Amino acid sequence: MRGVEWVRCSRCAEMVYGKRFARELGVCPGCGLHTRVGAGQRIEQLFDEGSTEPIETPPTVDDPLGFADDRPYVDRLREARLKTGLDEAVVCVRGTIEGHPAVAVVMDFRFMGGSLGTGVGERIVAAAEVALAERVPFLLVTASGGARMQEGALSLMQMAKTSQAMAELDEAGILTVGVVTDPTYGGVAASFATLPDVLLAEPGAHIGFAGPRVIKQTIGQDLPEGFQTAEFLRDKGLIDGVQPRSALRSTLARLCALGSPESGPAPGSGPAPGSGPVPGFELGSETGSVFGTGTGSAGTPEPRASGLILRPEELPVRNGWTAIQLARHLGRPTTLDYAGYMLEEFVELHGDRLGGDCPAIVGGIGRLDGVPIVLVGHQKGRDTRERVERNFGMPTPAGYRKAARLMRLAAKLGRPVLTLIDTPGAYPGIEAEENGQAWAIAENLRLMSSLPVPVVAVVTGEGGSGGALALGVADRVLTLSNAVYSVISPEGCASILWKSGAEAPRAADALGLDARELLGHGVVDGVIPEPGEGAHTDPARSAQLLGAAVAEAFGELAVHDPKKLVAERRRRFRRFGSAPR
Ligand SMILES: [Zn+2]
């Protein structure tokens, strides 16, 4: 057996025929080990065949310091070039992934450990500038031990230079996607590698700032199992997901499609005056809009495809406690159910990029009626096991911070935001308090009041207190007909004001928390009728009605520029408490 034909897995020692190993994209079929692949191979795996062309980079200085250790740096460079056939530790190309244009920088660990020097920094920035000029998604596949020592402080400066290139892409609303591969460390991890909007990692990849050996030596402690692996970082909310190599191409294609500026409204700017309808949005006729102005047809509003109810008198008067029971029905569709029914190409994103991924708030990007939107919602879970895993839909601060991250992404990309509200309340717990639950909720209220994109919130079940409102500062607030929205749970209210939890039904009635009351007080702008006995009896139909109502609302909001949107939204919330005139 010759080495060329057979490959031995370094982890499980399985012998794999070379051609099969290549077909498996360098992943061991025995144990799933994702071996390191070179930049050229990676580009072949990700891009459409024959679609790539190199990105021109201006010439760079090879050895700015005249550095030598036991050998001159120039000799090491020459050797790396001979060994890899590359001129630097990164390859930059433009091309298409399943037909969607992208600009990519792909690092190669074989070239001096993928280290970041002036040549690498220069190439990355040149590629970012092409993505900026052509307005196409920017993809970074990283593999690096860190900054290149042989270039001293000039190497350190590449961290700032590449990060500011990422900032320029953010300001321009260009989607950035990172694939962190094994290993990504030091100055690369602490700059462009971890800044992208969406961060994916390959299974088992090691990512961090300081290497495990340094940490161990410094603190003199054993490191936890799986320390710095992709899976570990996902659980800590630092990356969006772990993706096997075989799934990367299709995920990246989907993200590039959703992030492409042509597939939605202009980033962060809305339509320019006189530029006409935003492509992809179905606009409500101006006179047909029953929201906002309060004038117009005094008679019956135009019937809507969604059947949205705008007058409280069209809803039955009912007991608050009955409403509560229906709103809490265990069979009600969850946010992920709605995503599955309503959205095409939904990609769930994870983590607050600070320290946690709260399972009680979910979110991601997908298409509603062909238009890319960002969805964020509470997630209660369907069966007992999932409900426990999801903490019964009670978010931690990490959940609210994840929501904030996704809403900022929506603002950056100019995508409308849909939030689905269904929580008994924010999680009351020690850790939640330690991590700033109140701060996280307050931050979302402020953030949502400034988002320069259309925001629609729908209460789909229990709208419990500040933990619900933290997703509820929207241009249009709708509710399903059996949902409730309240400042406190009836049980909580009863035990405080009536000094007895048993008085919860009385409290439920007094709080005015059902759809008719909410619409009457203008807390919600419209009520989406539920089919049959409630959403739980026909989740598919519920999702259809919800989707239609949301699409209508987005259509009406799309005509406004961001300044007007924000001003109207603030007016909407400013009016609560004014005496009727
Ligand atoms: Zn193996």
Image (cartoon, rainbow, N blue to C red):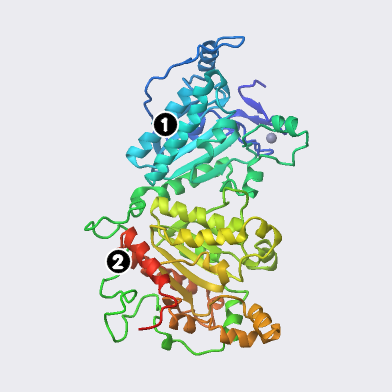
Q: Name the quadrant of the N terminus.
A: top right
Task: Estimate how packed mark 2 is, as few (under 14), some (14 to 19) or many (20 or more) residues with alpha carbons within 10 Å.
Answer: some
Give coordinates of residue 476: x percent, y percent: 41, 70
As measured in the structure, the alpha-carbon distance from the residue carrying label 2 to the one carrying label 1 is: 40 Å
Give coordinates of residue 320: x percent, y percent: 57, 85
Residue at 67%, 56% in the rendered image:
434
The amino acid on which the numbered mark 1 sits, given as a three-letter code, is Val
- Is 329 located above or below residue 410 in the figure? below
Query: What number is the disc on residue 125?
Result: 1
- Is 122 located above or below residue 273 in the figure? above
As helix, strand or loop, the secondary structure at mark 2 comes to loop
Quadrant in the picture for residue 208: top right
- Is 382 located above or below residue 109 in the figure? below
Asked if residue 333 shows in the view, the reply is no
Q: State the residue position of label 2.
A: 283
State which mark lies toward you, 2 or 1.
1
The amino acid on which the numbered mark 2 sits, given as a three-letter code, is Leu
